[in-house]
Image: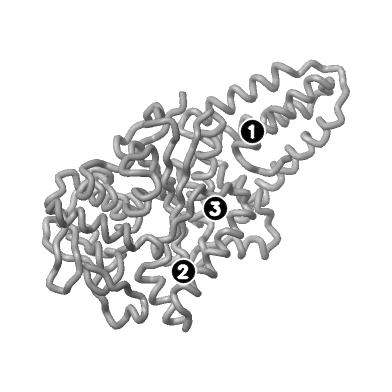
């Protein structure tokens, strides 16, 4: 039985879907700049989650949003002398190219915030009608956090009492204060030509409401899994739960799953710290995409991983060893019966993956199989079965061995 760590309950839970199709909402990139490798740790994990669920026989519908309107995107477009659409279309294209380089499966739906403004307006109107949202003196519409009794249940944070209104997307120091936040932002001159004329007034949506509207549109008011990085837990995913409860009276997702940070030299990799690599940076240095992916898999998504260039080199060497064994198996016609080796490896691989998708241990099972095979001369029948095992493992990890 597959077990997943649910951030909401703070424990591993057996995965039981709500219906015939597993609905998964995965927080995608903000397409106003390059996604860095720390971002891709989450995207790679989201990919293997979908692959493994399908391997287990589940039908899956995955939605991955593209955030193409937010404060930083508008500021960046203005600085670069581009329209918001020009900027976001460019970086969206780069993101899709990066996904292909890392052999990540496309989502079933890639919704964009700018294409869902009518849905955003409707969900805000529902919250206002239900008494969870109000219009501020500045013309913006805010969520009234004090009306939601379960605020903080996902993040388990103790917040300072207060009564602030936060209009910006990133809360900064105000994150520690119990504050109302903007759902619909009234127009300001800095917004330039980025606005919509609606019944809520001239303005644009806040970042947090976008995911509530897009997930509801494509997966309904209740679905199975919501995935993101740990930095999404608060305030972003906390707000999504509050918003959906305010509109529909329920938490939108049964399981909330979050990938840990990627570290570099002992610090969190982030754009704000300037200590990050993009995939483009690493490809220019001639590092192989699958070696980068292998390194990202080397520890469970629940553990911090220190990213180094030496680590990519070591991952590449492990890849080459496995490739060599696979190539040898294609022409093997030895004397050793290796059926048990293959079965044992696949069992260990599945145990690791069933235990909260522990890709680190799953890779170990693959490496042990490769090493064991390198020491014998498998007969043709055994070779075919071992190749089948490698092919199954690769279909889950997507490392392009075949």
The colouring scheme, among rainbow, by chain, secondary structure or one colour, is one colour
Of labels 3 and 1, earlier in sequence is 3
Residue 94 % position (x, y): 57, 64
Look at discs 3 and 2 and give the one toward the viewer: 2
- Gap in Å between the C-alphas at discs 3 and 2? 24 Å
Regarding mark 1 in the picture, which secondary structure is present there?
Answer: helix
Regarding mark 3 in the picture, which secondary structure is present there?
Answer: loop
Q: Could you say which quadrant of the image residue 161 lies in?
A: bottom left
Question: What residue is pinned by disc 2?
Answer: 32
- Gap in Å between the C-alphas at discs 1 and 2? 35 Å
Question: What residue is pinned by disc 3?
Answer: 307
Q: Looking at the image, can residue 397 be seen?
A: yes
Position of residue 34 in the picture relative to residue 242 (left or right):
right
Compared to residue 2, the image places residue 81 above or below, namely below
Position of residue 379 in the picture relative to residue 245 (left or right):
right
Position of residue 114 in the picture relative to residue 392 (left or right):
left
- Gap in Å between the C-alphas at discs 3 and 1? 24 Å
Q: Residues within 10 Å of mark 3 (few under 14, many from 20)?
A: many
Question: What residue is pinned by disc 1?
Answer: 393
Look at discs 3 and 1 and give the one toward the viewer: 1
Q: Looking at the image, can residue 311 be seen?
A: no
Compared to residue 213, the image places residue 1 above or below, namely above
Of labels 1 and 2, earlier in sequence is 2
Q: Could you say which quadrant of the image residue 364 lies in?
A: top right
Residue 317 % position (x, y): 71, 45
């Amino acid at each position: 039985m597959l077990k997943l760590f649910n951030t909401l309950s703070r424990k591993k839970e057996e995965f039981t879907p709500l219906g015939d199709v597993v609905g998964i909402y995965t927080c995608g990139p903000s397409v106003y700049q390059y996604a860095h490798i720390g971002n891709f740790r989450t995207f790679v994990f989201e990919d293997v989650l979908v692959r493994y669920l399908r391997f287990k026989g589940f039908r899956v519908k995955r939605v991955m949003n593209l955030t193409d309107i937010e404060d930083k995107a508008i500021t960046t477009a203005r600085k670069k002398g581009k329209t918001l659409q020009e900027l976001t279309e460019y970086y969206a294209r780069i993101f899709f190219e990066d996904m292909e380089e890392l052999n990540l499966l496309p989502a079933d739906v890639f919704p964009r915030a700018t294409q869902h403004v009518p849905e955003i307006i409707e969900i805000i109107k529902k919250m206002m009608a239900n008494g969870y949202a109000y219009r501020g003196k500045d013309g913006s519409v805010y969520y009234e956090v004090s009306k939601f009794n379960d605020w903080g249940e996902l993040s388990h944070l103790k917040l300072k009492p207060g009564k602030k209104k936060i209009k910006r997307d990133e809360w900064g120091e105000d994150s520690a204060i119990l504050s109302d936040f903007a759902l619909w932002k009234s127009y300001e001159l800095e917004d330039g030509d980025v606005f919509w004329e609606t019944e809520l007034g001239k303005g644009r949506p806040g970042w947090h409401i976008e995911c509530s509207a897009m997930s509801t549109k494509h997966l309904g008011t209740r679905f199975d899994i919501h995935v993101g990085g740990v930095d999404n837990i608060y305030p972003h995913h906390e707000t999504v739960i509050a918003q959906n409860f305010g509109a529909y009276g329920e938490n939108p997702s049964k399981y909330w799953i979050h990938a840990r940070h990627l570290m570099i030299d002992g610090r969190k990799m982030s754009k704000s710290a300037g200590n990050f690599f993009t995939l483009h940076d690493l490809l220019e240095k001639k590092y192989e995409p699958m070696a980068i992916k292998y390194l990202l898999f080397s520890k469970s998504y629940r553990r911090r991983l220190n990213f180094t260039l030496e680590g990519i080199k070591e991952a590449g060497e492990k890849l080459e060893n496995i490739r060599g064994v696979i190539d040898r198996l294609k022409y093997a016609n030895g004397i050793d019966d290796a059926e048990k080796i293959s079965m044992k490896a696949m069992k260990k691989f599945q145990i690791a993956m069933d235990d909260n998708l522990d890709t680190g241990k799953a890779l170990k099972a693959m490496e042990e199989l490769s090493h064991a095979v390198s020491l014998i001369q498998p007969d043709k029948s055994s070779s075919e079965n071992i190749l089948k095992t490698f092919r199954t493992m690769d279909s889950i990890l997507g490392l392009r061995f075949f």
